[in-house]
Image (cartoon, helix red, strand yellow):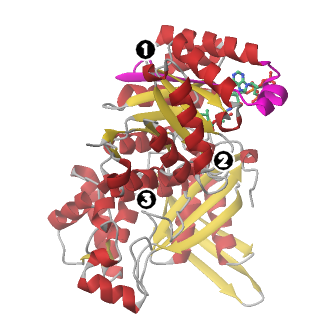
C-alpha cells in the first residue's frame, strides 16, 4: 500500500525567484495549465503583494485553472494576507500560504523580533488567513536552522491557530538528510497536535541535497513535497519535481509512498518551462536531460540490447521520452503530425494545427529527417499577435576586416494583413550586430543584448538551431527565442521576439539578475 504524497509545485513562485526566470501573465497561465495536466496537487501561483502583475497572475490562474489547489504566498502581516486571500478567492480550491522566519539569525538580524513576538505574529497571521480560507499553510522560514524546542512551539501554535499544513523549509539549503530526518521526526514525536496538519518539505539545493533531504522528510513522516520543474528556484534552486516524483515511483519498494503525477508528462513540461524561460537543463540532468537515457559505452549497449533493465532503472517512455525519435518526413500528412504531437504531449487542433502543419512542411523541405525535438520546437512557437513583428527576409554582407551590413524586412501583424518595412544598417560589428541594428531601425527601439546562446534542438548536420537572447530595454529584461535550420536566421528571429516582448513592456527589472553577464 502506498501512502499518498501531495505535490505542491512552486515553479511559478519560488521558481520564478530564479535569476532570469521571470514569466509574463500568458506564460504563467500556460505553465499553470501544464502543471494541472501533470496532475500536481497544489500550484503556488505567486506572491500577490509583490506587485500588481503578481496579483493578476495569481488571480487569473485561480479563476481559470481547474482541478487543482491554487495557493498565494503572504508574509505574516494583514496587507499581504488580505491580498493573497483576494487573489485566490476565485479558485476551485484556494490555499493561503503564510510564512514567518523562526531561526535565531533571522529573528535577530532580519525581523528584529524575539521568540514571543514570532509566536504571537504567527498565530495572528494564521488566524487572519483562516478567516479568509479553510486551507492554510504555515511556514516557519529557515526551519532547518531553528532551535528544535522553539520550532516545536511555533508549529504547535500555528496548528492550534488553524494551519492545515505546516511546511518545514530548509531555506538556505544547509541541511543534510540525517539533519532533516531528525527535524521531522522530532516534530512527529513532540508536537501534540501534529496529526491535525500535513507536514511539508521545502528544500533548497545549495549543497546539492534538496531531493535527498525531501526524501528523508518523507521517511520521517512528511506528507507534502514542495518542488519545482527542472529544480529552478532561488539561488541553486529547489527540490526538482521530476526527480522526487521518479524517486518515489522507482523506489516505491522502499518508501511505500507515491504521488498522483502523470509521469509521461514530465519531459514535455520540463521542455515547456525551458522554452518559456530560455533556461535549458544540462544534458546529464536526471530524468529530463537529453543524456538521461543515452547509453554510450559498448558493455552498456550490449546489456541494453540483451535486456534493458540491466542498465535502466526507469523506462524513457514512462517519463515522456518517446521510444522512436525519428518520425516524420515531407510526405507526412496532418493526421500523422497531429497524432505524433499528441503522443509528445501537445494536443494541437484546428487553426493551430494548420499553422504548425505549414511550418512543418517548410521544415521538411529543408531537413531530410524531422525528429520529435524539431516538432516540439515548432509547437513551442507562440502565434504572433496583431502588434508583433515577424521576420520576412534578411540579407547580410560581411568580409574580413570590413564592417558588416544587413538589410531586413519585417512584417507587423498577421501574414495576410500585416505591413512590411525594410531597413538597412551599415557598420555592424559582425553579421549579427548588423542584423540586430537593422531590426532596431525597423521597430524603432534599442535593446542591449546581455545574453546570447545557440544550441542544436535535434540531430544531424541539418539540425535546427535554437537561439535564445536576453536583452535590456528601458531598465527591464526581455527574452526572445528563434528556431531555424540556419543559425543566423534563428538568431535574428530570437532578436525580433525580444523586440516584441520589449514593445509589449512589463519585463522584470534588469537588476534582479545579480549574476548577470
Ligand atoms: C524565503 C522566500 O523565498 S520568501 C519570498 C521571497 N520573495 C520575494 O521577496 C519576492 C517578492 N518580494 C517583493 O516584491 C518585495 O520584497 C515586497 C513587495 C514583498 C516587500 O517590499 P518592501 O516593502 O520594499 O520590503 P523589503 O523587501 O525591502 O524588505 C522586506 C520587509 O519584510 C519583512 N519581512 C520579511 N519576511 C517577513 C514575514 N514573513 N512576515 C512579516 N514581515 C516580513 C522584513 O523584515 C522587511 O521589513 P522592514 O522593511 O521593516 O525591515
Ligand atoms: C516561503 C518559504 C517557504 C520559502 O520559500 C523558503 O523558506 O525557502
State the residue position of label 2.
Answer: 173
Q: Is residue 340 above or below residue 170?
A: below
* Residue 416: quadrant of the picture: bottom left
Quadrant of the image containing the C terminus? bottom right
* Residue 259: quadrant of the picture: top left
Residue at the image point whose x is 66% and y is 40% from the top: 171
Magenta region, residue range: 89-114
State the residue position of label 3.
Answer: 271
Quadrant of the image containing the N terminus? top left
Residue at the image point whose x is 63% and y is 20% from the top: 154
**Tag 2, which secondary structure?**
loop
Q: Is residue 428 left or right of residue 140?
A: right
Residue at the image point whose x is 79% and y is 24% from the top: 111
Compute the Cα span from label 3 to label 1.
Answer: 35 Å
Out of 321 and 56, give the one closest to the viewer. Answer: 321
Q: Mark yes or no: residue 368 visible.
A: no
Q: Is residue 462 left or right of residue 452?
A: left
Image coords of residue 428 (percent x, y): 73, 74
State the residue position of label 1.
Answer: 134
Image coords of residue 413 (percent x, y): 45, 50
Amino acid at each position: 500500500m502506498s501512502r499518498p504524497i501531495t505535490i505542491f509545485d512552486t515553479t511559478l513562485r519560488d521558481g520564478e525567484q530564479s535569476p532570469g526566470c521571470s514569466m509574463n501573465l500568458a506564460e504563467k497561465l500556460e505553465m499553470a495549465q501544464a502543471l494541472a495536466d501533470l496532475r500536481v496537487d497544489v500550484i503556488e501561483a505567486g506572491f500577490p503583494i509583490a506587485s500588481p502583475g503578481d496579483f493578476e497572475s495569481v488571480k487569473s490562474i485561480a479563476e481559470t485553472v481547474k482541478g487543482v489547489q491554487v495557493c498565494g504566498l503572504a508574509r505574516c502581516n494583514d496587507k499581504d494576507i488580505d491580498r493573497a486571500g483576494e487573489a485566490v478567492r476565485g479558485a476551485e480550491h484556494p490555499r493561503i500560504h503564510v510564512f514567518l522566519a523562526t531561526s535565531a539569525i533571522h529573528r535577530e538580524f532580519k525581523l528584529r523580533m524575539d521568540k514571543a513576538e514570532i509566536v504571537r505574529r504567527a498565530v495572528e497571521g494564521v488566524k487572519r488567513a483562516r478567516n479568509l480560507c479553510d486551507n492554510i499553510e504555515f511556514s516557519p522560514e529557515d526551519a532547518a536552522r531553528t532551535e528544535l524546542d522553539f520550532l516545536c512551539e511555533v508549529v504547535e501554535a500555528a496548528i492550534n491557530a488553524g494551519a492545515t499544513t505546516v511546511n518545514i523549509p530548509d531555506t538556505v539549503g544547509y541541511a543534510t538528510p540525517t539533519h532533516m530526518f531528525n527535524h521531522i521526526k522530532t516534530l512527529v514525536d513532540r508536537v501534540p497536535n501534529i496529526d491535525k496538519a500535513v507536514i511539508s518539505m521545502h528544500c533548497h539545493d545549495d549543497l546539492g541535497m534538496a531531493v535527498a533531504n525531501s526524501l528523508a522528510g518523507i521517511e520521517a513522516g512528511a506528507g507534502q513535497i514542495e518542488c519545482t520543474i527542472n529544480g529552478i528556484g532561488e539561488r541553486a534552486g529547489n527540490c526538482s519535481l521530476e526527480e522526487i516524483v521518479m524517486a518515489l515511483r522507482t523506489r516505491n519498494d522502499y518508501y511505500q509512498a507515491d504521488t498522483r503525477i502523470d509521469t509521461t508528462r514530465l519531459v514535455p513540461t520540463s521542455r515547456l518551462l525551458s522554452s518559456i524561460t530560455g533556461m535549458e537543463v544540462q544534458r546529464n540532468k536526471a530524468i529530463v536531460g537529453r543524456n538521461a537515457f543515452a547509453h554510450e559505452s559498448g558493455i552498456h549497449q550490449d546489456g541494453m540490447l540483451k535486456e534493458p533493465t540491466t542498465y535502466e532503472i526507469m523506462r524513457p517512455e514512462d517519463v515522456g521520452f518517446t521510444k522512436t525519435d525519428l518520425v516524420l518526413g515531407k510526405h507526412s500528412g496532418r493526421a500523422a503530425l497531429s497524432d505524433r504531437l499528441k503522443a509528445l504531449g501537445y494536443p494541437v487542433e484546428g487553426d493551430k494545427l494548420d499553422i504548425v502543419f505549414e511550418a512543418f512542411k517548410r521544415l521538411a523541405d529543408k531537413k531530410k529527417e524531422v525528429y520529435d525535438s524539431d516538432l516540439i520546437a515548432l509547437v513551442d512557437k507562440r502565434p504572433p499577435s496583431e502588434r508583433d513583428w515577424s521576420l520576412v527576409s534578411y540579407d547580410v554582407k560581411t568580409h574580413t576586416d570590413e564592417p558588416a551590413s544587413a538589410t531586413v524586412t519585417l512584417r507587423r501583424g498577421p501574414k495576410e494583413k500585416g505591413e512590411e518595412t525594410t531597413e538597412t544598417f551599415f557598420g555592424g560589428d559582425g553579421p549579427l550586430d548588423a542584423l540586430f541594428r537593422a531590426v532596431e531601425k525597423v521597430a524603432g527601439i534599442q535593446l542591449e543584448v546581455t545574453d546570447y546562446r545557440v544550441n542544436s534542438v535535434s540531430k544531424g548536420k541539418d539540425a535546427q538551431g535554437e537561439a535564445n537572447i536576453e536583452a535590456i530595454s528601458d531598465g527591464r529584461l526581455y527574452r526572445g527565442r528563434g528556431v531555424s535550420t540556419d543559425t543566423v536566421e534563428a538568431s535574428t528571429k530570437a532578436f525580433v521576439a525580444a523586440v516584441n516582448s520589449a514593445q509589449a513592456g512589463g519585463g522584470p527589472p534588469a537588476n534582479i539578475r545579480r549574476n548577470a553577464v
